[in-house]
Each structure stands twice: as C-alpha cells, then as structure tokens.
Image (cartoon, rainbow, N blue to C red):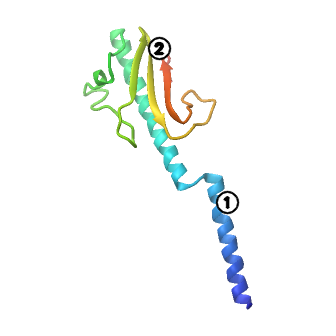
Amino acid sequence: MTLNKLAVIISSVIVLVAVITGFALIGSPVDERLRRLDEHRIDDLRRLFAVISEIYVLTDSLPDSLEDLVNGRQLSQLPTDPESGAMYHYEVIAPASFRLCAGFSSASESGVFWSHGAGLHCFTLSPQARR
C-alpha cells in the first residue's frame, strides 16, 4: 500500500467519523424537519390562544368554534397543521377554560408550558393566563 492510498483511507475515515458525530450531536435532517414542524404547531396554538384571549376580554365569553376567530382583524384565515393541513382541535370545557390540541411528531423538551409528547396532545388553557 502506498503512502497516498493510506492518506486517502485515513482522510475518508476521519470524514466519516465527523459526519456520524455530527448526526449524533444535532440529529438527522429528518429529525430537524420534524422538530421545525412541531415548533410551527406550537406557534399556531400560541396565536390561536392570543386571539381567543382577546375575544374573551372583549366579549366576556369564549368563541364557540375556531371558525368564529376569523374576522379579518386578528385572523384572516385559520392556521392549519403544517404537515397534514388538518385543523387544530378546540373545545370549550368551562365558561373560562378551553383546550387546544394538535398532533406532534415527537416529544418536546420538558419543563416549559408548551411541552408535549409525541402524538395528539391537548393544552388546557384559560384566557386570563397569557403565555
């Protein structure tokens, strides 16, 4: 084996180790895409929460459905799941309490209010508690 061939093999092994280490540290491109989709879902739920809270402050009641949020001022159209296009789930559970639900690709970091597991997760919210 010549010195050049040995250098090429060693260089190839170093590059391969660096790529594998990179994926291990930051995750694969697929994992990153799923994480960004979940972040988009949380941003949508936060936006819906803000509009629902604003309507509650103005009317002292929760809207009956998400469709009631589309008024041209706060929302011109409802956000939908960035991957499936499905609507988010909204349910009034008390005069000043409701649930917003979405399907998530993977579990999020724990310890923050909007943390969630993989799959369908519902957040129980109150319009008085701005988050």
Q: Mark 1: which amino acid?
A: Thr
Mark seen at residue 21: 1
Give above or below for 101 relative to 125: below
Position in image of residue 130 (x %, y %): 48, 20
Mark seen at residue 128: 2
Left or right: 72 in relation to 58: left
Give above or below for 43 relative to 10: above
Front one among 122 and 74: 122
Position in image of residue 73 (x %, y %): 28, 26
SS at mark 1 in the image: helix
Q: Mark 2: which amino acid?
A: Gln
Instruction: Give the mark nearer the N terminus: 1 vs 2.
Output: 1
Location of the N terminus (image quadrant)? bottom right
Residue under the image location 69 percent in, 71 percent down: 14
Left or right: 74 in relation to 94: left
Give above or below for 28 relative to 36: below
* Crowd class of label 2 (few under 14; some 14 to 19; many from 20; radius 10 Å): few
